[in-house]
Image (cartoon, helix red, strand yellow):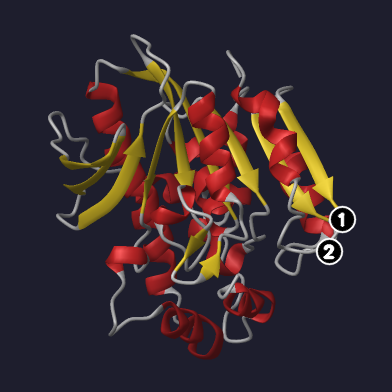
Amino acid sequence: LTAVGLFLYWYAFIALEESPMEQGDILEAYEYPSVESLQLDMTETRPNVFSFTYESFDGELVYGQISYPDITADKYPVLIGVSAMGRSYVRWWVDTFNGNPTVTQAHKIAELANSNGYAVISIDARYHGKRKDPDRTLRSIMNDVHFFGDKRDYEAMVRDTVLDHRVLLDWIEQQDNLDIDRVKVAGYSMGGQIGLILGSVDARISDIISIVPPFIDDKLALVAPKNLVSLLGDKPVLLITAADDENASAAENDLLFELMPGANKERIDFDGGHILPEGYVNRLKGEFEYGG
């Protein structure tokens, strides 16, 4: 990932101190005004694939895409794909973008889901893809965290992206052909972080696949999954980790997994670093079989 270097900043945070928060105070930050009649402006780009925009809770414009399976059904289960830092929603449908390969293999996950009857949806995170701000780059946001101890924009980026997904869930709930009772979220790296938070704060997420999420401590307590995963209850959770991940040590991954409650959690640990081996998606096939 071109953004891996940014993740390395997260180890030191020399300008930040631990600042724990009560779980209730964290939850308050993820409240939002639900949208009862959300309208997406949709354009069909190819058969069964639509790009869209919508206004989020704060009026910000969100960009995304949805692909429907060839299988006909009255209601489709849904996969929400959440990209890694620096990556656009487009990555869930292409193996290369702007000349760079999709090393997260998100496109293979989407293909697996579509082929098993899932509708696949992904949106751009704040400051990503079509929402990039040339005056506020990801590097500048992370530099502020690392060098100046200013975490406001980073925490807002993650929190508001979670809330953008909660608004998206409002729309899914209003669709006759989408099954709000079967909404899976899968995310890689920062996407795995966001997926765990979203699944913790919103009951409409039925299960989670969190792939190599960075370990976030209480220097960024508001966006640390460890502070919220106790709320997952018995939701099925698949945590995929790497033994030598530069963004989460083995001990940190152990801790995150231990904090997840319930009997429906599973962990797969791969050798190597943050970029998983090419065939790792093959281990996910059971997650998308009927009822999976």
Residue 112's spot in the image, x, y percent?
57, 33
In the structure shown, which secondary structural element does the residue marked by tag 2 occupy? Answer: loop
Left or right of 183 on screen, residue 290: right
Residue extending furthest toward the bottom: 147
Which one is in front, 79 or 224?
Answer: 79
**Number of disc labels:** 2
Residue 61 shown left or right of residue 15 in the figure? left
Q: Give the residue type at disc 2.
A: Asp
Quarter of the image holding residue 258?
A: top right
Give the CA distance from mark 2 to mark 1: 7 Å
Instruction: Write the residue at 52% across / 26% down.
Output: 115
SS class of the residue under badge 1? loop
Name the residue beneath numbered marker 2.
244
- Residue 228 visible somewhere in the drawing: no
Mark found first going from the N terminus, 2 or 1: 2
Q: Are marks 2 and 1 in contact (CB under 8 Å)?
A: yes
Q: Residues within 10 Å of mark 1 (few under 14, many from 20)?
A: few
Q: Position of residue 153 (x, y in %)?
A: 38, 73
Determine whether, in the image, residue 22 is placed left or right of residue 170.
Answer: right
Vertical order, 30 against 203 (above or below): below
| Residue 175 visible from this viewpoint | yes
Residue lying at 53% horizontally and 90% vertically, measured from the top left? 147
The residue shown at (43%, 59%) is 158
Front tag of 2 and 1: 1
Q: Quadrant of the image for the N terminus? A: bottom right
Q: Residues within 10 Å of mark 2 (few under 14, many from 20)?
A: some
115, above or below 18, in the image: above
What residue occupies the far top of the structure in this picture? Answer: 74
Q: Residue furthest front?
A: 47
Which mark, residue 271?
1
Q: Position of residue 33 (x, y in %)?
A: 20, 40
